[in-house]
Image (spheres, rainbow, N blue to C red):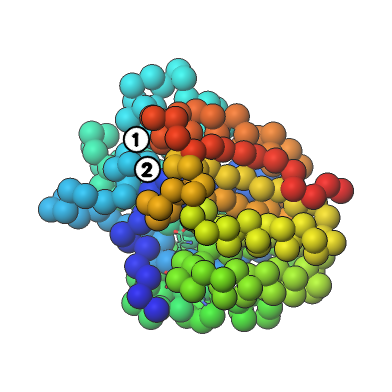
């Protein structure tokens, strides 16, 4: 396993994923009752940028978003504001440059309440150790240096009877990882049918992601949504053309809350107007 998320932190895919995560968690918080948040592929939680290496995918991701927001604050859709505030709080430095970007555990940790619980799974020892330090002092959060797919099985159904699961693999083995994701989703829903699961996936030249979506549609599972943001045409060979989140059992008004952010984000992240976005029900009630 060679994947290091630090190289990608803050890119366009992180922007979409973390924006959606903020909306999911905020929607869960509409009810007082606590819930379990599981991050099956958590990473280290916080990614400082090295000023001596000026490259970095974040420049064309969150860097563009923050520049556009600073240039015309009144044009930023309200649906983005909570996410942007969290990013600035984690790495805004003196306000002139971004010094770090928060990972999904850090974003969740900022939003969860005392009655909520979090389990972060991370297989790489170095990353898991860094995350353990990152979450020191978070009373109801724990890191498991373990396989996220196996761990989520052991956590469902949760004692809270409410759960939000983020599945965010690196897809180093494209088709095989999609198969593992699909099997995990089916298993999780068999254990806990009302579980909300959000699966991040890359949109690349091959149609692997579309095959995954088609399989989920054919699965008989109800209440599925798809959110995608692509900054290159689907068949472009640049590598990562875009990304998406497949969500099952979304909280009430999840799509309606998120959709207004997407046309603005697409304009900012793809100034030449390439690619596309969508936020749509995939399978109904
Ligand atoms: C895309 S990164 C996660 C990014 C993170 N969710 C975020 O949004 O900040 C994927 C992470 O999963 C870890 N990983 C890979 N396979 C895993 C597995 N089977 N179980 C748990 N973690 C895994 C990798 O070490 C890597 O840190």
x and y, in percent, of residue 245 in the image: 60, 52
Q: Going 41% across and 61% down the picture, which residue do you hit?
A: 45
Question: Does the rendering let one see residue 105?
Answer: yes
Q: Which mark is residue 61?
A: 2
Report helix, strand or loop for mark 2. loop
Taking 96 as reference, is 199 above or below it? below
Q: Going 55% across and 34% down the picture, which residue do you hit?
A: 262
The 10 Å Cα crowd at callout 1, few under 14, some 14 to 19, many 20 or more, is some
Q: Quadrant of residue 73?
A: top left
Circle 1 residue: 64
Residue ranking furthest to the left: 52
Question: Residues at badges 1 and 2 in contact (C-beta under 8 Å)?
Answer: yes
Taking 22 as reference, is 179 above or below it? below
x and y, in percent, of residue 201 in the image: 55, 58
CA gap, disc 1 to disc 2? 6 Å
Q: Going 27% across and 55% down the picture, which residue do you hit?
A: 48
x and y, in percent, of residue 79 in the image: 56, 32
Please indicate whether residue 91 sits to the left or right of residue 116 in the image.
left
Q: Going 25% across and 47% down the picture, which residue do you hit?
A: 99
């Amino acid at each position: 396993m060679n994947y290091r998320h630090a190289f990608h932190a803050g890119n366009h895919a992180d922007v979409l994923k973390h924006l959606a995560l903020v909306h999911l968690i905020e929607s869960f918080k509409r009810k007082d009752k606590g819930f379990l948040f599981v991050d099956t592929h958590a990473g280290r939680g916080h990614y400082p940028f090295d000023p001596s290496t000026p490259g970095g995918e974040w420049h064309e991701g969150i860097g563009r978003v923050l520049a556009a927001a600073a240039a015309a604050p009144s044009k930023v859709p309200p649906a983005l504001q909570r996410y942007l505030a969290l990013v600035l709080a984690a790495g805004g430095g003196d306000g002139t440059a971004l010094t770090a970007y928060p990972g999904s555990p850090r974003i969740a940790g900022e939003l969860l309440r005392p009655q909520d619980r979090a389990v972060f799974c991370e297989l790489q020892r170095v990353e898991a150790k860094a995350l353990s330090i990152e979450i020191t002092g978070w009373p109801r959060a724990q890191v498991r240096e373990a396989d996220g797919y196996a761990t989520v099985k052991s956590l469902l159904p949760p004692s809270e009877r409410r759960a939000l699961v983020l599945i965010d693999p690196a897809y180093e083995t494209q088709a095989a990882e999609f198969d593992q994701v699909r099997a995990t989703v089916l298993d999780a829903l068999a254990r806990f049918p009302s579980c909300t699961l959000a699966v991040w996936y890359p949109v690349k030249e091959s149609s692997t992601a579309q095959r995954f979506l088609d399989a989920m549609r054919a699965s008989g599972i109800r209440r599925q949504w798809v959110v995608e943001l692509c900054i290159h045409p689907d068949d472009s060979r640049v590598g990562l053309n875009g990304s998406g989140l497949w969500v099952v059992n979304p909280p009430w008004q999840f799509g309606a809350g998120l959709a207004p952010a997407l046309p603005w984000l697409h304009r900012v992240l793809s100034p030449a107007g390439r690619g596309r976005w969508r936020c749509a029900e995939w399978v109904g009630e």
